[in-house]
Image (spheres, rainbow, N blue to C red):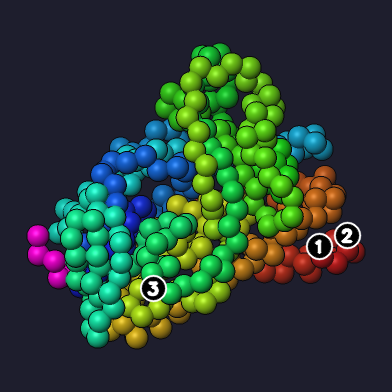
Amino acid sequence: MENIYDVAIIGSGPAGAAAAYELAKQNIKTIIIEKEKLPRYKTCGGGFVYRGLKNMPFDVSSAIERKFYEVEIIFGKKNLDFVTKRKNPIISMIMRDSFDHLMVKEAEKLGITILQEAKLTNLIFKDTTTNIETTKGTIEAKIIIAADGALSPTAKLAGWEETRMMCPALEYEIKVPQEDFKRLSKKVRFDIDVVPYGYGWCFPKRNHLSVGVGNFMKNNLKVNLKKDYQDYLQTLGIQTVLDEEAHGFIIPISPRKDGFVKKNVFLVGDAAGFADPITAEGISNAIYSGRLAANAIAENKLNIEKAGFSYHQKLDKKLIKEIEIGIKLSKLFYGQRQLRNLLLIKYGQRAAEYMTDIFMGDRTYPADIKKKVKKRIGISI
């Protein structure tokens, strides 16, 4: 294998694969370095919202297990239940092993190289290139894209300090009796507040359920997600679990505060902290940021300084603004529940429709939410 590349991407998830695909279209010599063998299981609820699906540059239908045109959002403690429907699938269910592998294979068709079972061990920065030391040898590259997830060893080696808000989640892939599966597989379901400062989700896949719980706001409470999960099963009416596989993980729900480019390393996806602050959905923003980084690099012909400036400009134009507003809204949604519930009693269905429009890519978070709340109910937030 020739070991000198224009761009090396660490990680083969949606962000890395999307970046690789865009770079390959521009005939930029690119390699993906993946620590595991593909396809590999990836902990994730697997809900791919329509705003991401409709912007995919190639067909991913073979990796979609089910499509849902109806979503239910339940605030059980207040007996508030909202259902939204759309003509296009609001959320498509994927298993990340199949989905990620499909994306990588599409990039491979355009000429990128994939190095599997190669764990990153060190980065040696030189004047114009970097030696990327792995368990399968050393790769030399002009530019690195760190797409290696929430823990991102690449970011640590490149000198980033931890400034993201990291929130815990627990997901179970479970099989239940057929009667329960039939009852729970008709729609996607979110149960808000079954976890303090968070929610539970029930995502029906082809022949099983992905059930999870997560805490999505930084607080001083001790979290017991295993107990929250057991309680959530009762909320779902599941008395018997035939088989289950647990996966714990963390989700960065705020961007890094010290930029997204250092030296010749560009951060994308969870490595940068681009998950939605309210829903913690990260696939669509991961793909979007991967494409932005790739385009910035291609447009500036591998000039690191110009590409880094361009990447930050592209992020600031839309994504960072949306996330910053989302962070403010999450403080209302999870942190001021009494006020939130007061608003939902009167405007709940409208809010659910608005959130669904965001999932569909038809709207973004309202920048003037504080003014709207004060105008409608006379309370400042």
Mark 2 and mark 1 residues within 8 Å of each other at the beta carbon: yes
Residue 306 image offset from top left, x and y in percent: 34, 85
Q: Is residue 95 above or below residue 21?
A: above
* Residue visible at 60% across and 61% down in the picture: 165
Specify the amino acid type for callout 2: Ile
Residue 49 image offset from top left, x and y in percent: 49, 47
In front of the other: 138 or 262: 138
Q: Is residue 375 above or below residue 229?
A: below
Q: Is residue 94 magenta?
A: no
- Quadrant into which the N terminus falls: bottom left
Mark 3 and mark 1 residues within 8 Å of each other at the beta carbon: no
Q: Which mark is residue 158?
A: 3
Local crowd at mark 1 within 10 Å, few (<14), some, or many (≥20)? some
**Marks 3 and 1, how far apart at CA:** 43 Å
Q: Is residue 77 among the parts visible in the rendering?
A: yes
Residue 45 image offset from top left, x and y in percent: 50, 41
In front of the other: 364 or 182: 182
In front of the other: 34 or 199: 34
- Secondary structure mainly formed by the magenta segment: loop
- In the image, the segment drawn in magenta is 1-5
Q: Which mark is residue 377?
A: 2
**Marks 2 and 1, how far apart at CA:** 6 Å
| Residue underneath mark 1 | 373
* Residue visible at 80% across and 36% down in the picture: 77
Question: Which numbered disc, 3 or 1, marks the residue that appears first in the sequence?
Answer: 3
Residue 247 image offset from top left, x and y in percent: 49, 38
Disc nearest the viewer among 3 and 2: 3
